Image (cartoon, helix red, strand yellow):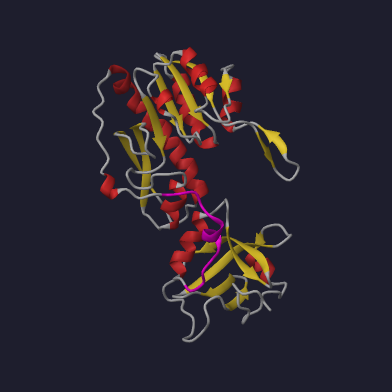
Amino acid sequence: MKVIFMGTPEFAVPSLQTLLNDKNLEVVAVVTQPDRPVGRKRVLTPTPVKVEAEKHGLPVLQPERLRRPESVEAIRTLQPDLIVTAAFGQILPKSVLDLPKLGCINIHASLLPKYRGGAPIHYAVMNGDAVTGVTIMYMAEGLDTGDMISKIEVPIEDSDTTGTMFDKLSLAGAELLERTLPDLLAGRVQAVPQNDAEAVYSPNITREQELIDWTKPAEQLWNLVRGLHPRPGAYTVWNGEVLKIWTCAKPDESDQASEGVQPGTVLEAGERGIAVAAGQGVLRITELQPAGKKAMDAAAFARSGQLAPGTVLGTSGD
């Protein structure tokens, strides 16, 4: 069976490796996003999937737009029996979906129909879910609307962030693909339609979502911070500048601010970090990053005396 793999970030690499290890398959090409400038020096950098593909001497296609006729024709020429995608980053047009006789399948990092869209891992952590997972589905023209082939659940621990869940779900997706391939190639799968009425969407994170609203409960803010770690990161405003909040301790229900204290007020700054009043409860910051500086331990920053008790975060400081 000839297969084309489409993927871009590190999340997709274990799934590509699974395909390469299957003796019943021949990976005839890898399709990934074009090289992009990265970092302050804007160094043109290949995607992790491209790096992995080149290790194995695989042909790599990097179309700016997959739906362009020349891109579709390049895939048609390869005559794939199956197309497998994982965090590719582009929507496949019908002209591509119709090419392989075994169809196009996608490895999606959620338990569909929950969290369709581009940021399923972020939303699962931000919403405080206890469990998420991976779904392998047939691809359709809609956004993650195809029939579901198989699923695997992965718990979200208190210590998890979007970064750690990214790694866990990447490996879980590869494991699920390995388990699913034999039945798929033999034509034994019985796909289940999604219930559109239960669909939940997870659009890409906006700058507005990254801003901490101190009037919200501390536990909700803790989930927000770990859901945005390691990128793009949550932030507040201090003295008119961005103050990144990278990590926080899980709120203790017994830790409450005095009645009448304005949300965003620093209550304590010491060796246990920086405690800030929330709309309900207290959020204790353990790692932060002032504007123009590197990320640092909140206790170390507290010793500088710059964020003294009584300071109100989330205001311009004027």
The answer to whether residue 250 is seen in the rendering is: no
Which residue extends farthest front? 69
Give coordinates of residue 109: x percent, y percent: 41, 41
Residue visible at 60% across and 21% down in the picture: 55
Tell which of 99 and 236 is nearer to you. 99
Query: What count of labels does the image hold?
Result: 0
* Residue 214 highlighted magenta (yes or no): yes
Screen quadrant of the C terminus: bottom right
Tell me which residue sits at (51%, 57%) in the image: 226
Residue under the image location 32 percent in, 44 percent down? 113
Outermost residue toward the bottom? 260
**Quarter that holds the N terminus:** top left
* Image vertical order of residue 82 relative to residue 245, above or below: above
Q: What stretch of residues is rendered in magenta?
A: 202-215
**Does 75 sit above or below residue 246?**
above
Assign the magenta stretch its main secondary structure. loop
Is residue 158 or residue 33 the one in the foreground? 33
**Image position of 241 with respect to 175: above or below:** below
Residue 160 as seen in the image, left or right of residue 113 = right
